[in-house]
Image: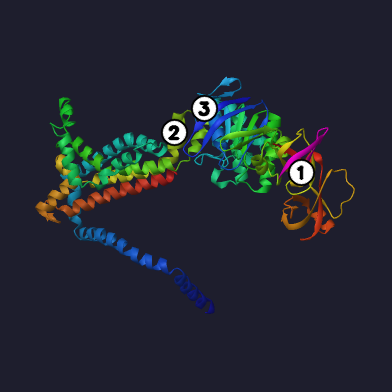
Amino acid sequence: MIEVRDLYKDWKEFSLKGITIEIKKGEYFVILGPTGAGKTLLLETIAGFYFPDSGEVWIEGHDVTNLPPEKRRIGFIYQDYSLFPHLNVEQNIEFGLKLRKSQDTTRKKMKEIMDWLRISHLAHRYPTTLSGGEQQKVAIARAIAIEPSVLLLDEPLSALDLRTKDYLREELKKIKRELGITMVHVTHDQTEAMVLADRIAVMMKGRIVQVGTPYEIFNKPLNEEIADFVGVENILSGVVRDNDNGVAEIEADIGGNIFAVSDYRAGAVKLFIRPEDIILSESRGESSARNVLKGRIEALDDIGPLTRVKMDNSVVALITKQSRECLGLQKGEEVYATFKATSVHVVR
Amino acid sequence: MPMRKSKIKEVKEKLKREKIFVLFLFLGLFLIAFICITLGNMFYKQAEDFSGLIDAAKDPIVLEAIWISISAAICSTLIAFLFGVPLAYFLARKDFIGKSIIESIVDVPLVVPHIVAGIALYGVFMRYGVIGAPFEQLGIAFTDAFSGIVIAMLFVSVPFLVDAAREGFKEVDPRLENVARSLGASHWKTFIKITFPLAFSSIFSGAILCWARGISEFAAVMIIASFPRSASILIGDRFTSYGLSGLPGIAGARPISVLLISICLVIFILLRILQRRSK
């Protein structure tokens, strides 16, 4: 368990402004934010590499605010692996073990961990001769060898190629599942956050702006800035005209009325709709969805397996290549964008 | 035959592509020639008078002078190491107001003419000097003493060690230290096990330069301690009194120089090999 209470710290270029978070034991907690938000510095302050100007850090029920990093029982993983270049794989892994355990337990434990992470064959290699993925596995082995209560990971997968990334993501899940370590993972990668996190904290400009489950973060962002960052491409403005049993009728700026599940009864609001929640069709058709907006296709962009469709009324939809072909979508063509009232998130 | 032709053509094209490097190499070779001709000529002339070199190598005065130079330089390097490595680490890791002033002070000996350094040192370390006087009470004198030679060498050579060590420490990623700390190593242990070994190669290079610079010092040593005679003082003396070649029974400046530089080169090469090995 980790508790950060009202933490402040000022550097020349960055600062942490009143950070308060509570991370449960055994939880996989992701701190998500754009570059320069201060995520790494927060993680390093939790680790004790920096000391806060004010505020407290508690780990496992102990106030560690003034303890040096070596007394905190934490594992720390950096993006660039940070293996000791003058030591081979085995020596890297036993570095922390040797400081706390007897020679015999050290050797036993080391073998165990190297087998578990399938890196035994690398034992006598030096870090510079290893691939990125291998280096990161060694770094993970080195960190979990000391049986930390908390594992802090600073963009651990960001420097790796896609396949290695997928593979290591599974390894991280395995560590959480089988060792029950509390994991705090810092990243700017939304997919990574979505796949790994039990809960996510969004960090911007030195503050935690929202904490929630991946569903909450990606579908119910608290404000426009967060919505924009988590990939809500449809951010509309409107005014609530009516509310019928928790379904608000909102007159949108782009024209037409939009129905949304919301308790607001009046006033100006913002509407967030994720592009993947929008269905495109050529005719109005019969649908249980309440909202239908008509528009002309302005742009079609292939992004990986998906196609991003931008309409002239600024609505953006993400559809599969398959459905693009089925519908035979062309630039300039008129289409209907359909979405449910539950897909619209309304904020003041 | 056609193969050959294409090869010549290939080389020609390569020279054309790398015109600037060809030109720069040509210019640079002037410097290399300057150094090689100067030292080579000295060795060559001495080779013609090989018995003179043997005589010098048998002369106890010469051997003692060389030994004094080498050992005094070792002492000054050790002192520079003891105080300079901590300073270098501090400068590499900490930012503070006036840091560039401290760094400039470290480098001042590089720009002070060494005769001036000698005069300044003499003023401080002589019997009535600020530092010389209290040491005099303890029975330690610097003027015309081995310790005076060490002090003079230390002053002129310390920047080489501190600068090299500082750059070496800077190249060690602080994140490596962070990780070591997180694994349970104290700051002190982290320095010993991670930082110092990783910076060692640079520190060692700096120490070699520091040592070599110490041996070569003449002016500052001459002012504060022309006695006991260190090698450079002896060479200077012999040059003014007996010229390059010397007289029968008295070695001139050149054989002593050749002897000194040969010994230093051997030590230098051995140290370099040792350094490579340790890597």
| The C terminus of chain A, quarter of image | top right
Query: What residue sits right under mark 2 in the picture?
Result: B191
Where are the magenta residues, as a range? A236-249
Q: Residues within 10 Å of mark 2 (few under 14, many from 20)?
A: some
| Mark carried by residue A251 | 1
User: Where is residue B220 shown, x and y percent of the image?
Assistant: 18, 43
- Relative to A215, B128 lies left or right: left
Q: Residues within 10 Å of mark 1 (few under 14, many from 20)?
A: some
Is residue A245 a member of the stretch shown in magenta?
A: yes
Give the residue type that dot 1 points to: Glu
User: Where is residue B132 shown, x and y percent of the image?
Assistant: 17, 31
SS class, disc 3 = helix
Seen from this angle, which residue lies furthest bottom?
A: B1
Give the residue type that dot 3 points to: Glu
Can marks 2 and 1 be said to lie on one chain? no
| Mark carried by residue A70 | 3
SS class, disc 1 = strand
Mark 1 vs 3, N-terminal side? 3
Rendered view: A190 above or below B3: above
Q: Residues within 10 Å of mark 3 (few under 14, many from 20)?
A: many
Give the residue type that dot 2 points to: Phe
User: In the rendered image, which quarter is residue A238 located in?
Assistant: top right
Main secondary structure of the magenta stretch: strand
| Visual colour scheme | rainbow
Mark-to-mark CA distance, 2 and 1: 65 Å
SS class, disc 2 = helix
In-front residue for pair A226/A322: A226
- State if disc 3 and disc 1 touch (CB < 8 Å): no
Please tell me which residue is depicted at 75% across the width and 45% down the height of the picture: A252
